[in-house]
């Protein structure tokens, strides 16, 4: 494992012989962003189609409680965050399918309950706040090798998942009843999608933090909607925006001395603004 | 298959659907015959869409829905095409008509492009539905009539044995409605599927259906169109104030006037 990473680092040195890419922490940050941001952006396209931006936000905030639980139990918060995020994602999806309440109401209930639980834990354990800050604001410069390998594994998982189920996820996003008549097994697709989103959200928190994680899923996909006319270009534009803003954000943060995660999100927002201008200028059909 | 008469393609026996303790449909017996147009009529909430969903296997039911196939049509489970009543679509979604075909037809993820087979099948069935020019149009921006044709084309692509159409002319203007119905009879004659058509518009039913099933949670009656569309049967379905009367249109189109929304 160590040798794979050092090989990759050597490759980054050859491809990017610049001052900003020299320190090992910058290489890790760059790799972390180039692994999580495109995965998040690819999932973002069907996520936006399903109107699930609020869902990803809820998973992001559940990570807050996951981290608090980890610190409380003396386990690595990186992993309790993933476990708790997955748990909340599955719980929301199951409850949503079994009530007449609208999905944003169900998510709202879970969202506030989970955050309240997190705050209750933190308020009992003095001194936790400092640990939480890294997760709230995100710090790709502090990503460990183990986390980096997890992100790489997740990148492959997302690619495989989307290759297998993308058509069914999108068909479900167009119209549930119609997808059902075309043989889409709705509960299986919904739960697996929620699970993969939860895994990617909790990984992306290392890069941009709890407060901004939804941006990595929603902003590139929103920009793609402004530009793309068909399903294929929507996904590739979204991934392209993620790669571009991940790269631009990390370089800019090095020279401007700003928080990396926030700078990446600002770069993505700039792409969105450009896409909105493009759309406004495009002749309407 | 045993127990089936030669012509029948679908036999419904004692079909009951319950939802939340309420019987939405009780004890329905009906047949769909091969190559015929059967209209399903009844007031709002009569369970028409539910019956379609039961045939599609999308709602749990008790009773029996048996598919039979005349020997000359080959073996195997029947292919059922379905054109839903309304498909509320996101007008901004970056999804074209071709994408829509690809999503339900090909294994290759749509972000790697539509396969040649998908493209050809889509082009061919859009052609048959009379709208070949819509292939690259954004799905969410189609008009009601265009979407109807696209959904119809999608159903035709799988060469169905039975085609279920839920309110095929809702959201389409009168001229478009006539056009669609004439076109439908033509395609139906060419392709020889049996057609089950839900409709509110009794003029459409009177003109195009061979047989009629009248439904109001129970089976009110069923039979040949001319025998079934009588004022007694209409009264049993829609209430005593309902009349099928003809306006002074040159084409003699009839409308059901359901006074007081029974």
Image (cartoon, coloured by chain):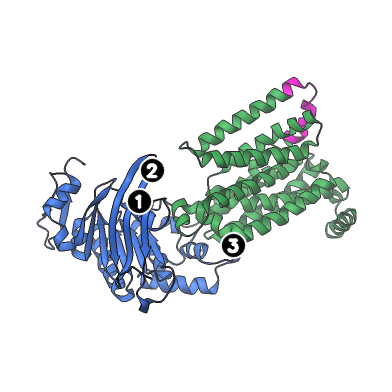
Mark 2 touching mark 1, by CB under 8 A?
yes
Which chain is represented by green in the image?
A
Secondary element at image label 1: helix
Q: Main secondary structure of the magenta part?
A: helix
Rendered residue at 88%/48% (across/down): A24
Rendered residue at 80%/49% (across/down): A148
The quadrant where residue B57 appears: bottom left
Q: Nearer the viewer, mark 3 or mark 2?
A: 2
- Tell me the distance, in whole angstroms, between the alpha carbons under discs 1 and 3: 35 Å
For disc 2, the neighbor class at 10 Å (few under 14, some 14 to 19, many from 20) is: few
Q: Is residue B45 left or right of residue A174?
A: left
Most extreme residue toward the bottom is B72
Q: Is residue A58 left or right of residue B146?
A: right
The reply to whether residue A118 is in sight is yes
Residue designated by label 1: B50
Residue designated by label 2: B19
**Magenta region:** A122-136
Most extreme residue toward the front is B2
């Amino acid at each position: 494992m160590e040798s794979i990473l050092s090989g990759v680092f050597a490759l980054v040195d050859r491809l990017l012989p610049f001052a900003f890419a020299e320190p090992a922490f910058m290489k890790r940050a760059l790799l972390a962003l180039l692994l999580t941001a495109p995965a998040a952006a690819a999932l973002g396209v069907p996520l936006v189609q399903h109107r699930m931006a609020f869902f990803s936000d809820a998973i992001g905030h559940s990570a807050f409680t996951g981290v608090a639980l980890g610190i409380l139990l003396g386990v690595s918060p990186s992993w309790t965050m993933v476990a708790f995020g997955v748990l909340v994602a599955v719980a929301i999806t199951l409850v949503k399918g079994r009530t007449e309440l609208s999905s944003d109401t169900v998510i709202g209930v879970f969202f506030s309950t989970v955050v309240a639980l997190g705050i209750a834990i933190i308020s009992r354990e003095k001194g936790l706040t400092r640990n939480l800050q890294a997760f709230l604001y995100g710090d790709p410069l502090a990503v460990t090798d183990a986390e980096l390998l997890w992100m790489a594994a997740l990148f492959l998982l997302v690619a495989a998942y989307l290759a297998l189920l993308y058509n069914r996820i999108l068909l479900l996003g167009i119209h549930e009843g119609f997808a059902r008549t075309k043989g889409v097994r709705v509960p299986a697709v919904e739960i697996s999608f929620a699970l993969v989103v939860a895994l990617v959200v909790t990984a992306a928190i290392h890069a941009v933090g709890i407060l901004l994680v939804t941006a990595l899923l929603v902003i590139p996909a929103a920009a793609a909607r402004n530009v793309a006319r068909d399903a294929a270009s929507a996904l590739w534009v979204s991934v392209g925006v993620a790669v571009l803003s991940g790269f631009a954000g990390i370089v800019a943060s090095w020279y401007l001395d700003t928080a990396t995660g926030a700078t990446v999100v600002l770069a993505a927002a700039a792409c969105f603004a450009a896409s909105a201008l493009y759309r406004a200028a495009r002749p309407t059909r | 298959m045993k127990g089936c008469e030669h012509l029948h393609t679908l036999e419904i026996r004692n079909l009951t659907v319950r939802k939340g303790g309420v019987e939405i449909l009780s004890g329905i017996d009906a047949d769909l015959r091969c190559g015929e147009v059967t209209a399903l009529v009844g007031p709002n909430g009569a369970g028409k869409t539910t019956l379609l969903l039961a045939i599609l296997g999308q709602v749990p039911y008790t009773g029996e829905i048996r598919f039979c196939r005349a020997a000359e049509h080959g073996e195997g489970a029947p292919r059922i095409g379905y054109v839903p009543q309304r498909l509320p679509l996101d007008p901004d979604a970056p999804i074209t008509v071709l994408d829509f075909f690809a999503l339900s037809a090909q294994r290759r993820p749509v972000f790697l492009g539509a396969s040649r087979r998908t493209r050809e099948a889509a082009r061919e069935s859009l052609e048959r539905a009379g709208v070949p020019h819509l292939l690259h149009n954004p799905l969410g921006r189609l008009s009601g009539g265009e979407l109807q044709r696209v959904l119809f084309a999608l159903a035709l692509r799988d060469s169905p044995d039975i085609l279920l159409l839920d309110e095929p002319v809702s959201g389409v203007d009168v001229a478009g409605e006539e056009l669609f119905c004439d076109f439908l009879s033509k395609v139906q004659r060419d392709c020889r599927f049996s057609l089950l058509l839900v409709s509110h518009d009794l003029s459409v039913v009177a003109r195009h259906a061979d047989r009629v099933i009248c439904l109001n949670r129970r089976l009110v009656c069923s039979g040949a169109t001319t025998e079934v569309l009588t004022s007694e049967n209409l009264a049993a379905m829609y209430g005593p104030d309902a009349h099928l009367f003809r306006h002074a249109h040159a084409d003699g189109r009839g409308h059901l006037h359901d006074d007081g929304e029974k």
